[in-house]
């Protein structure tokens, strides 16, 4: 079975968040199950720079206002199609925003073009790879099923379609005047097509027109059917009924392996947990914290945004600093960046923050922190708590979305049964977060149950094995139905 995956990011070539991790990991996880997955991604400079054996398999002029070449190429273990359209993608930096932090003004055309090519490959544009399924990720690939429905290419193949929602907050809404530029006919601008509150809705189109919709955890799949997490799309999601399901993300357990991780000060596994202390000391040093093994060290690796609840953590800083230390790595919202810079100045030796994106430090935090904090207001799946489980950093999370599905709270009963892996709190408020911080700090002082939490987490299966099986099942069911 062949599947074309269409996405705007792919690890390790270009990444702004968890989407890239998932898109980059799925092909390798599916291959042993007999599924050949290729990924179509935009030809950003960072992507073009890493390609090996690139071959031009298709060309067009006058394509969304310029010339395009479609490349078939490999990058490491990944088999790619790369949409090389310099007028759309030859720009430095972030895939979505200009240097001033604002979205590129032509994002509709940039990602419309990506979806157009995805739909065409789905219909047999490249004879050497005609997929049974086109799997589109997020709004950037959202128009794939719209092109298949309203502007089919010349090919005769009819792929089935799956759309995965990694975050419903990003919907891709654009001016309806762009319809013709996108190559969509007037009849597509309808309530059962791409129309969304008077605009063109890329994600809306995908949710309306894909054969199946998945999101990245069972709890989030339920939450988005309600008005709060549904963000305007809950009615449509309810209407799609059991076409909508949740499949948890995994993590790449080769990239995230404390036993072989080159970024750590000391490598360890469940049998050599004591070696973890050297990573804690290294992290304390790196973050200008007092090097003290007794204090619980709380870690954060996150985008700094409202979604991630890090304003609540900033409010809880006196409680945290009174009971332990904080090592925070993050970037994003300027107000939050300033708050954490101030917190580090207010609590020298107790609060450390590094603003920016740093893969290496992210690994050291997972290996050195005692607790990994994820106080998100909503969280489709969340990957950092999965890394934390694998690294023996006990996750302390808000009880929402995928965080609800992946962490077992250290309730009295769960501790008694020996199955707890972390801490959850709800509702997502500062007092409840503070209460959870205190609960974690108290249990940290009891060495035996704490170690049990760590080991339970490290033995949890956070790999792609189970999720990949679920995707394979979904694809096979669709192919049979087709
Ligand atoms: P989201 O995709 O909403 O940002 P996820 O938890 O799903 O959140 O995925 C975030 C991914 O990005 C994880 O792999 C995490 O380690 C990584 N990450 C987030 N912020 C940083 C940072 N500042 N430096 C390094 N890695 C980061």
Image: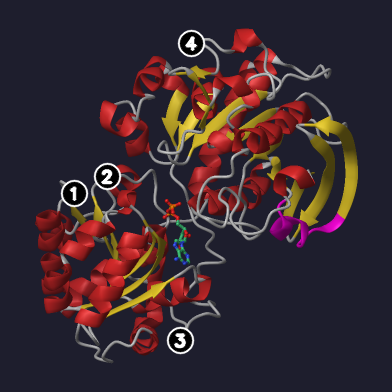
Q: In the drawing, does residue 2 fall left or right of residue 163?
A: right
Give the alpha-carbon distance from disc 1 to disc 4, as whole Å: 35 Å
Q: In the drawing, does residue 140 fall left or right of residue 347?
A: right
Give the alpha-carbon distance from disc 4 to disc 3, as whole Å: 57 Å
Mark 1 in CB contact with mark 2 (< 8 angstroms) = yes
**Residue 324 image offset from top left, x and y in percent:** 18, 78
Residue to which mark 4 is pinned: 191
User: First in sequence: mark 2 or mark 4?
Assistant: 4
Q: Nearer the viewer, mark 1 or mark 3?
A: 1
Q: Nearer the viewer, mark 1 or mark 4?
A: 4
**Residue 244 image offset from top left, x and y in percent:** 44, 25
User: First in sequence: mark 1 or mark 2?
Assistant: 2
Residue at (25, 87) in percent of width and height: 349
Residue to which mark 2 is pinned: 400
**Which image quadrant: the N terminus?**
top right
Decide if residue 332 is in sight here: yes
Give the alpha-carbon distance from disc 1 to disc 2, as whole Å: 9 Å
Q: Nearer the viewer, mark 4 or mark 3?
A: 4
Q: Nearer the viewer, residue 60 or 402?
A: 60
Q: Nearer the viewer, mark 3 or mark 2?
A: 2
**Residue 188 image offset from top left, x and y in percent:** 60, 12
- Give, as a single range, the part of the protein colored magenta: 44-53
- The mark found on residue 428 in the picture is 1
Give the alpha-carbon distance from disc 3 to disc 2, as whole Å: 33 Å
Asked if ligand 1 lies within 8 A of label 2, the reply is no
Quadrant of picture, ligand 1? bottom left
Are there few (<14), some (14-19), or many (20+) residues within 10 Å of tag 2?
many
Residue to which mark 3 is pinned: 266
């Amino acid at each position: 079975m062949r599947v074309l995956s269409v996405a705007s990011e792919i690890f390790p070539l270009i990444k702004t968040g968890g989407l890239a991790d998932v898109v980059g990991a799925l092909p390798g996880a599916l291959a042993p199950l007999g599924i050949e997955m290729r990924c179509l991604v935009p030809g950003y400079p960072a992507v073009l720079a890493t390609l090996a054996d690139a071959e031009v398999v298709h060309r067009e002029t006058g394509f969304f206002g310029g010339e395009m070449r479609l490349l078939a190429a490999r990058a490491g273990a990944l088999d790619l199609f790369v949409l090389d359209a310099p007028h759309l993608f030859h720009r430095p930096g972030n895939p979505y925003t200009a240097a001033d932090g604002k979205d590129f003004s032509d994002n509709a055309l940039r990602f419309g073009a990506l979806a157009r090519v995805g739909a065409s490959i789905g219909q047999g544009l490249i004879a050497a790879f005609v997929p049974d399924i086109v799997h589109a990720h997020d709004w950037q690939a959202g128009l794939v099923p719209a092109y298949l429905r309203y502007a089919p290419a010349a090919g005769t193949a009819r792929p089935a379609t799956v759309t995965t929602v990694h975050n419903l907050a990003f919907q891709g809404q654009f001016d309806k005047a762009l319809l013709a530029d996108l190559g969509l006919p007037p009849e597509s601008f309808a309530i059962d097509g791409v129309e969304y509150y008077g605009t063109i809705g890329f994600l809306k189109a995908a949710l309306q027109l894909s054969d199946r919709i998945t999101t990245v955890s069972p709890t989030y799949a339920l939450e988005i059917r309600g008005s709060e997490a549904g963000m305007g799309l809950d009615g449509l999601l309810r209407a799609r009924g059991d076409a909508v399901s949740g499949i948890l993300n995994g993590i790449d357990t080769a990239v995230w392996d404390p036993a072989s991780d080159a970024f750590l000060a000391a490598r360890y596994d469940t049998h050599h947990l004591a070696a973890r202390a050297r990573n804690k000391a290294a992290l304390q040093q790196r973050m200008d914290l007092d090097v003290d093994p007794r204090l619980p060290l709380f870690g954060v690796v996150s985008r700094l945004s409202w979604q991630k609840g890090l304003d609540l953590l900033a409010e809880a800083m006196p409680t945290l600093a009174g009971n332990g230390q904080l090592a925070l790595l993050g970037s994003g919202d300027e107000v939050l960046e300033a708050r954490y810079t101030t917190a580090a100045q207010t609590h020298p030796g107790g609060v450390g923050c590094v603003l920016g994106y740093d893969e290496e430090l992210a690994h050291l935090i997972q290996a050195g922190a005692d607790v990994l904090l994820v106080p998100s207001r909503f969280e489709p799946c969340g990957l950092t708590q999965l890394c934390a489980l694998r690294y023996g950093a006990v996750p302390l999370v808000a009880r929402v979305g995928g965080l609800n599905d992946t962490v077992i709270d250290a309730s009295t009963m769960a501790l008694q049964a020996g199955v707890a892996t972390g801490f959850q709190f709800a509702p997502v408020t500062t007092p409840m977060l503070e209460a959870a911080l205190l609960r974690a700090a108290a249990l940290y002082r009891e060495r035996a149950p704490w170690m049990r939490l760590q080991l339970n987490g490290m033995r949890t299966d956070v790999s792609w094995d189970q999720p990949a099986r679920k995707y394979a099942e979904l694809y096979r069911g669709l192919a049979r139905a087709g």
